[in-house]
Image (cartoon, rainbow, N blue to C red):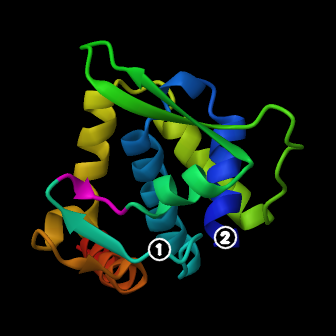
Amino acid sequence: MTKLKNATLYVCQNYPHANELSKARLTKTIYLADWKSAIEHGRQLTDITWVFNHFGPYVDDVFNMAVVDEDFIVERTASMYGDAKNVIAARPNIKPIQVEDADKTVLDHVIETTKNKSYTSFIKLVYSTYPIVSQPRYADLNLVQLALVYKRIMKTIDEL
C-alpha cells in the first residue's frame, strides 16, 4: 500500500488543478503513471492489478486507500453537470512526499501531460493506451507484460 499511497500523495500534492482530482481522474492518472513506468522501467509504480472494466482501466484501490488513510481528504461534491463526485486531496498539513527520482520523473510527466486536458480529452488519452486498445473488456491488465509487447511493436515499426 505504501507505493500506492506515495504515488497518490505525490499527484495530490503536485497536480495544479486539485479540484479536478475526482475519484475517476485520480485513479486513471495513477493508471497512466503505472503504464508509463512499465514502459520506461519495466515495473509499475504501484502494486495495483489493473482491470479493463466498463469504464476503462479501473480499480477501487486508489479511492479505498484514500478513504481510510488519514493523510487524505475525500470531499463529496458535484460536477459541473450536477452529478455527485468525490474529490480526493492530500491534507494540507502533510509535508511534501518524497519519491524515487525515476518515479518522480514518471509522475511529473503524467501530470504535465494531463493537467490542461479537459476530462473528455483526458479520457481519450487513457482509452488510447495500448493496454486498453489491445485487450478485451474485463481482462486483468498485466502492464509490465503489455509494455514488453508494446515496445516490440514500436521497435518493429521504427525499423520499417
* Mark 1 or mark 2, earlier in chain: 2
Question: Which circle marks residue 151 in the picture?
Answer: none
Mark 1 packing: few (<14 Cα in 10 Å), some, or many (20+)? many
Identify the image quadrant of the N terminus: bottom right
The main secondary structure of the magenta stretch is loop
- Residue type at the position of mark 1: Ile
Q: State which quadrant residue 16 falls in.
A: top right
Which residue is identified by label 1? 48
Q: Amino acid at mark 2?
A: Lys
- Nearest the viewer among 146 and 86 is 86
Residue 132 placed where, x, y %? 21, 63
Look at 54% across and 68% down and name the residue there: 37
Q: Is residue 3 left or right of residue 31?
A: right
- Asked if residue 57 lies in the magenta stretch, the reply is yes
Q: Quadrant of the C terminus?
A: bottom left
Q: Which residues are magenta?
A: 55-59
Residue 58, horizontal then vertical, whole percent? 31, 59
Under circle 1, the secondary element is: loop
Dot 2 lies on which element? helix
The answer to whether the residue labelled 1 contacts the one labelled 2, judged by CB atoms less than 8 Å apart, is: no
Residue 157 shown left or right of residue 17 in the figure: left
* Residue 60 or residue 109, whichever sits in front: 60
From the image, tell me which residue sits under label 2. Answer: 3
Q: Residue at x 26, y 79 (%)?
A: 140
